Image (cartoon, rainbow, N blue to C red):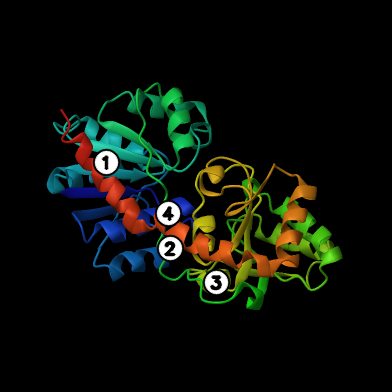
Amino acid sequence: MKVLEVISSLAPTGGGETFAVNLSRELSSRVDLAVVVLHRNNKSYFINRLKDKGIEPIILNKKGHLDSKNIKQLRKFILNFKPDVIHTENNAIISTYLALNKTKLKYKINVFHTMHLLPEKECNNFVLRFLYKHIFKKSNFIPVGITEQLANISKVFYKRNNVPFVNNGSNLENFKNIKELQKRKYDVVVVGRFSKEKNHCFLLNSFKELSKTHPNVKIALVGGGELFEDIKKLSSELKLDSYVEFKGVMSDPSSIVNDSKIITLGSLYEANPLTLIEGMSSGCIVVANAVGGIPEIVKDKKNGFLYNTNDMKSYVTFLSNVLDNIDEFTEMSKCNSKYAQNYSMKNCVKEYLNLFNSYGRGI
């Protein structure tokens, strides 16, 4: 099978970009794979991870949202490579549709687009909504949800009879349960971009409450983003400098996660966050907001704890309960490590290949 992976950009360090790179790495040993990145400026870390697997990505030079020259370049590559399947990430679906539109291949190649966000978040303006709905009217352009909830919502939004879903997957090799919970350095770890939807302000105010009853608590915040300095300033204003460590962007946060007791998120919305899966693989106990696809991963009080948005009292109570009774969570830690393997990238790629084959060739 010849598969073309079209990625909009590898400049952001979000879950979608990480997923695209990990998917490509795993696919490369199973199919004849080519990778095209539409924008020129990308994180060298991502590019090097592709090259480490023998993948030489084709880097184009897209400018703006719609770039006719860029579309022609992509069209030429598609015609030369003649893929059986195209897989897209983020808004690469638009460029791919336009590149195929004026060719004889426009109905002959199935294009699968992985959605990491709810449709109203991915299509966050009128133009994008119009384009996405128009594109997904075509039977050979197939949206794929990373959770069952996301697939069901997309089925209604795009008015399709069926939207498949494939569980999010991650490379879990470095996320290992190798240290007893009681002996781990960090009590709580947060891995995520410093942006509004990740709700770091709520987390910091909650950690302030936690510190009143747990004066030795150690918390690690991993990630970067537009609100990094603002959140760091808030931490100082709340006098949390002795409790909270800002680790910045880490190409491999496994060393911190493996050394943490609890992994947590305060997100206002999520689909299927890789960070929770990676934390579970490390044997962390999960405390997370019950939004999006998180309840599909975390079963309340069975493999973690769920609270409602901005419910600080419940959130701090759950954190305190785990820290105060850490000896009682050894079995949950072991079960989480085993359970997380269901979301390995190997399993994810197997499901994608089954999906690609189930649709056969286009018209």
- Report if the CB atoms under discs 1 and 3 are less than 8 Å apart: no
What is the distance, in whole Å, between disc 1 and disc 4 at their CAs? 21 Å
Q: The residue under label 1 is which amino acid type?
A: Leu
Q: Choose between 249 and 270: the one closer to the eye.
A: 270
Q: Nearer the viewer, residue 31 or 91?
A: 31
At mark 3, the secondary structure is loop
Instruction: Say whether residue 67 is visible.
Output: no
Q: Which residue is mark 1?
A: 355
3D distance between C-alphas at marks 1 and 3: 33 Å
| Label 4 SS | helix
Look at discs 1 and 2 and give the one toward the viewer. Answer: 1
Q: Which quarter of the picture shows residue 161?
A: top left
- At 31% across and 33% down in the image, what residue appears? 142
Closest to the camera, between mark 2 and mark 4, is 4
For the residue carrying disc 2, how many other residues have a C-alpha within 10 Å: few (<14), some (14-19), or many (20+)?
few
Q: Which mark is nearer the camera, 1 or 4?
A: 1
Q: CA distance from mark 4 to mark 3?
A: 23 Å
Q: Amino acid at mark 2?
A: Lys
Q: Quadrant of the C terminus?
A: top left
Closest to the observer: 206 or 136?
A: 206
Q: Where residue 43 is drawn, which disc sits there? A: 2
Real-space Cα separation, disc 2 to disc 4, in angstroms: 10 Å
Looking at the image, which residue is at 67% across and 70% down? 327
Nearest to N terminus: mark 4 or mark 3: 4
Q: Identify the residue position indicated by label 3 in the image.
A: 258
How many labels, in total? 4
Q: Which numbered disc covers residue 17?
A: 4
Q: Name the amino acid, label 4.
A: Glu
